[in-house]
Amino acid sequence: GAGVSQSPSNKVTEKGKDVELRCDPISGHTALYWYRQSLGQGLEFLIYFQGNSAPDKSGLPSDRFSAERTGGSVSTLTIQRTQQEDSAVYLCASSLGRPGSTDTQYFGPGTRLTVL
Amino acid sequence: GQQLNQSPQSMFIQEGEDVSMNCTSSSIFNTWLWYKQDPGEGPVLLIALYKAGELTSNGRLTAQFGITRKDSFLNISASIPSDVGIYFCAGYNFNKFYFGSGTKLNVKP
């Protein structure tokens, strides 16, 4: 597609349930990023995928969070046993990811997660 | 992690006024970026800066990459109502992007 797409756009869940958030990056972009944005705050880095390399998970807030990227394209962010503090907008971004070069990233519209 | 300090946190201005916001960091960055986020949308890239001292314009927007590589500013001239939104700075190093906390701009017609 023309841009980064994310689904669902909104997700309401009960505390303790698992959720899966999906990201479709721009075709040809090898780098994919997940961020979390709490109300009125900046973006908090969660995880970064570059091609087929092992992901940089340094931003994941707890072991309840995991992400995978199948075939170097679509990515799924999974949050297990959700807590109320997980409520936020989860943004995905992709970039060309050419090693050794400067890069810019393009964002999807986000998934608004509400944990009741 | 690397922290970006963005100011001001919010601004209320009259249509037609010029606006300035800036970002500082204790760390050096190779690239500085400025994004705008509208409600319910993801951030959209406005300007990317790749070299220390670089001054780049995009319409009414002008941004500069500080000489020390630890700061950047964004100016908006002759503001209009559709400039309303949240503006984020971001620094890029070694495949990671670090974001400021945003400047919320309100423009009164």
Image (spheres, helix red, strand yellow):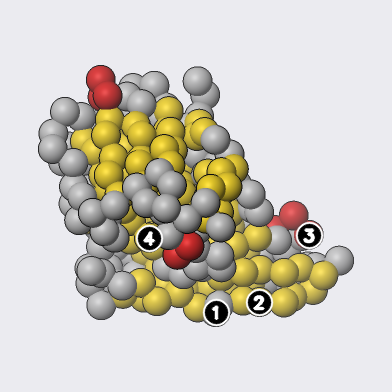
Q: Secondary structure at mark 4?
A: strand
Whether residue B30 is situated above or below residue A102 in the rendered picture: below
Q: A75 and B41: which one is in front?
A: A75
Residue B72: name its quadrant. Answer: bottom left
**Residue where numbered disc 2 is placed:** B11
Q: Secondary structure at mark 1?
A: loop
Chain of the residue displaying label 2: B
Give the number of the disc on residue B8. Answer: 1
Q: Are marks 1 and 4 on the same chain?
A: no
Whether residue B68 is situated above or below residue B90 in the rendered picture: below
Q: Are marks 4 and 3 on the same chain?
A: no
C-alpha separation, residue under disc 3 versus residue under disc 1: 19 Å
Given the current orientation, which residue lies at the most extreme left position?
A54
**Front disc: 1 or 4:** 4
Whether residue A11 is situated above or below residue A64 in the rendered picture: above
Q: Is residue A56 left or right of residue B67?
A: left
Q: Residue at x 31, y 72 (%)?
A: B3
What residue type is disc 1 on?
Pro
C-alpha separation, residue under disc 1 versus residue under disc 4: 19 Å
- Percent across and percent down for residue B89 are 44, 63
- Percent across and percent down for residue B52 are 29, 62
Q: Say if residue A71 shows up in the picture.
A: yes
- Percent across and percent down for residue A40 are 56, 68
What residue type is disc 3 on?
Pro
Q: Are marks 2 and 3 on the same chain?
A: yes
What residue type is disc 2 on?
Met
**Residue where numbered disc 3 is placed:** B81
Chain of the residue displaying label 4: A
Q: Residue at x 20, y 29 (%)?
A: A51
Q: Evaluate if marks 1 and 2 touch, with contact meaning CB atoms under 8 Å apart.
A: yes
Q: Evaluate if marks 2 and 3 touch, with contact meaning CB atoms under 8 Å apart.
A: no
**Residue where numbered disc 4 is placed:** A44
